[in-house]
Amino acid sequence: MKLGISSWTYTWAIGVNDYTPPCPLTPSDLVDKALSLGVSVIQVADNLPLHSLTSQERRLFAAKAARQGIELEVGTKGLTIDNIRRYLGIAGELRARLLRVIIDSAGDEPKPDEIVARLMRLVPELEAARVTLGIENHDRFRAHDLADIVRRVDSPHVGICLDTVNSFGALEGPEVVVSTLAPYVVNLHLKDFAIFRAAQMMGFIIQGRPLGQGRTDIPWLLQMLADHGRDVNAIIELWTPDQGAVEDNIALEAAWAAASVAHARRYIAG
């Protein structure tokens, strides 16, 4: 298992919604971040879309990462045939072996049967490219639905990108999600969280935390994956809360990234 960072580790530094930093973080900057933190994997996802770069920019990024011994993974949003084919091409440019995907995109929320049909069409292309597709658990689908999709496709090139927090959107906590999806995991998003009551006591708030300062049971999680023989890259993601100013958000997520890597190193040496 190797430890890595993501474009979702530095969401505020890249820019989100109406918050635009004066100098947005680039893929090349992520290589510098990885080196400073001492991690060996970078996952560039849909908040820093690689298809928006030129081919030359992607080549320079790949070359810089290769010189530093950094493994690259790519991510996108939208399980359409055309989008996955586009990102298979990008994965080839970056020599990436993992393509993480969120199923839904604007105007396209396919049902399980349609998802399986699309994946079956894509499997030969995944095999030819030697790329594994990691479907992220993300809001709409319950864990047993995702497990059923992967079982029906029945290919070593299609699995689960397991996120430790996302499935609260489907009313499922980590215990159910990990127990159900562990056998199919091909990539891991390490994310920590806290749950607390709103100030007026009406309702609960789920908020991000640095690794080790929330409720994600990392030793249990890693043991569950090991029990199923899943030796995958672990990518740190952060839900850094808004501090009211872009510069404060950027500073906080940088501190959280460093603290999260330090904590993860208790369990992950690679």
Image (tube, rainbow, N blue to C red):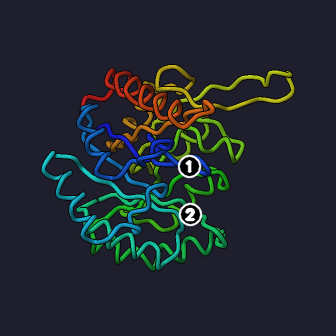
Q: Position of residue 68 (x, y in %)?
A: 15, 45
Instruction: Please name the residue that numbered disc 2 is placed on.
Output: 103
| Residue at screen point 27% across, 36% down | 39
Which image quarter holds the N terminus? top left
Count neighbours of disc 2 (C-alpha within 10 A) and say few if under 14, some if 14 to 19, many if 20 or more: many
Q: Position of residue 137 (x, y in %)?
A: 56, 51
Closest to the observer, 52 or 246? 246
Decide if residue 1 is in sight here: no
Closest to the observer, 34 or 23? 23
Decide if residue 108 is in sight here: yes
Who comes first in sequence, dot 1 or dot 2?
Answer: 1
- Amino acid identity at mark 1: Val
Instruction: Please name the residue that numbered disc 1 is placed on.
Output: 16
| Residue at screen point 42% across, 43% down | 188
**268 left or right of 225?**
left
Which image quarter holds the C terminus? top left
**262 left or right of 193?**
left
- Amino acid identity at mark 2: Ile
**47 left or right of 4?**
right
Q: Position of residue 12 (x, y in %)?
A: 50, 42
Residue 144's disc is none
Task: Give the CA distance from mark 1 to mark 2.
Answer: 20 Å
Most distant residue in the front direction: 22
| Residue at screen point 49% across, 26% down | 210
Closest to the observer, 67 or 193? 67
Most distant residue in the left direction: 67
| Residue at screen point 28% across, 60% down | 96
Q: Position of residue 223 (x, y in %)?
A: 41, 30
Q: Nearer the viewer, mark 1 or mark 2?
A: 1
Q: Is residue 225 above or below residue 156?
A: above
Element carrying mark 2: loop
